[in-house]
Image (tube, helix red, strand yellow):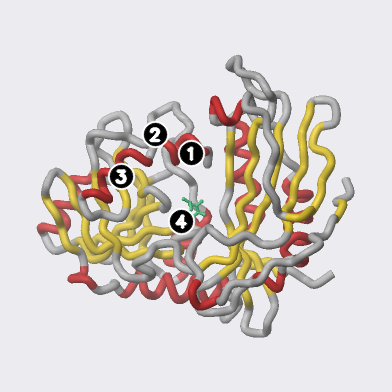
Amino acid sequence: MDISVTKADKLKDHPSDSGLGFGTIFTDHMFNMDYNPEKGWHNARIEPYGNITMSPAMMTLHYGQAIFEGLKAYRTPEGGVQLFRPMDNFRRMNRSAEMLCIPQIDENFVMKALLKLVDMERAWVPSAAGTSLYIRPFIFATDPYIGLKASSTYRFCMILCPVGAYYPEGFNPVKIWVTRDYVRAVRGGVGRAKTAGNYAASLYATELAHKDGYTQVLWLDGVELKYVEEVGSMNIFFKLGDEIVTPELNGSILSGVTRDSVIAMAKSWGMKVSERRIAIDEIFEAHAKGELKEVFGSGTAAVISPVGNIKYHEKVIDIGNGSVGPTASRLFSELMDLQYGKIKDPFGWTVPVTPA
Ligand code: COI
């Protein structure tokens, strides 16, 4: 399939790198393609970034049949641009698509489209420390129909957004809040899919966490309300003694690309890393015994985010006395150095965006 290109008549002013926040500024162009049962995915096009016209009956608006991904393009010290594990995102998108009854995409084709789009928008990739170009691929159901079924038509889009830190705290420790009153996902549900509804389901408890002065919710499993799952926008890691532990992928946790990178990187340093069930009580007991050394989250948007406090059942534990632990610090700096092309990539994770 060819990718047609329509250039924007007027290009936008670029923001200054230093004041970048997250998710509000979009580049000049976007990628779109459509699906119908007759033609499959078709009409692949790069065109000016702009609003989408939709029917008020569009199925996504009513039943949430929508999936998305998040990845980033980084500015290298030589002025080049590179992506981090993009195929892992497209593979995960297909796994999410399967769960949401959305047709599969051709991973190699969307990769080609992404390289073309990022190449066109390369001037938008910021270069200040900690900044990048966030890439949001997404697919949504477009049938104008309000009966409940899987849509027969879809739109796939990719939009780009120059960003700074996701959390206002930056790399300073965030505070997380554990609840037994609400769950994000249940056994047999769509917890492992990156689908809009999982994020919508997290909002109410997150509002309660904010009211209590906490940044994010740490979700427990939806069956026994006992085992740690993930945080609102990231996976979670604990350092117990010398070992790093993280919840195993049990079907209701998102298999984060950054999570996988953290595991591989820490193992390559000779650290012991276990993926297993972790009871929240075990974390509080480890803290009481002085064995809980560090807690941090991982995610594309969040990168590595140290956790300084956890509140559960009116009990608050402080981790690291407000400072960032050595493992989170090392992961943060080595992962970023690798993503930004400042060090050699022994894992084969980075993909250069070569100019056309
Ligand atoms: C990401 O980290 O890329 C995500 O998709 C999380 C989102 C809530 C910003």
Marks 3 and 1, how far apart at CA: 23 Å
Q: Of tags 3 and 1, which is closer to the observer?
A: 3
Query: Callout 3 environment at 10 Å: few (<14), some (14 to 19), or many (20+)?
Result: some
- Amino acid type indicated by mark 3: Glu
Marks 1 and 2, how far apart at CA: 9 Å
Marks 3 and 4, how far apart at CA: 25 Å
Left or right: 38 in relation to 75: right
Secondary structure at badge 4 equals helix
Name the residue that disc number 3 marks.
207
Q: Which mark is residue 168?
A: none
Give the x, y percent position of residue 80. Answer: 70, 77
- Which tag, 3 or 1, sits closer to the chain's start? 1
- Where is the C terminus found, in terms of image quarters? bottom right
Marks 4 and 1, how far apart at CA: 13 Å
- The reply to whether the residue tagged 4 has its Cβ within 8 angstroms of ligand 1 is no
- Which tag, 4 or 2, sits closer to the chain's start? 2
Secondary structure at badge 1 equals loop
Name the residue that disc number 1 marks.
192
Height in image: 157 above or below 37? below
Q: Of tags 3 and 4, which is closer to the observer?
A: 3
Name which residue lies at 89% across and 49% down. 2
Query: Callout 1 environment at 10 Å: few (<14), some (14 to 19), or many (20+)?
Result: many
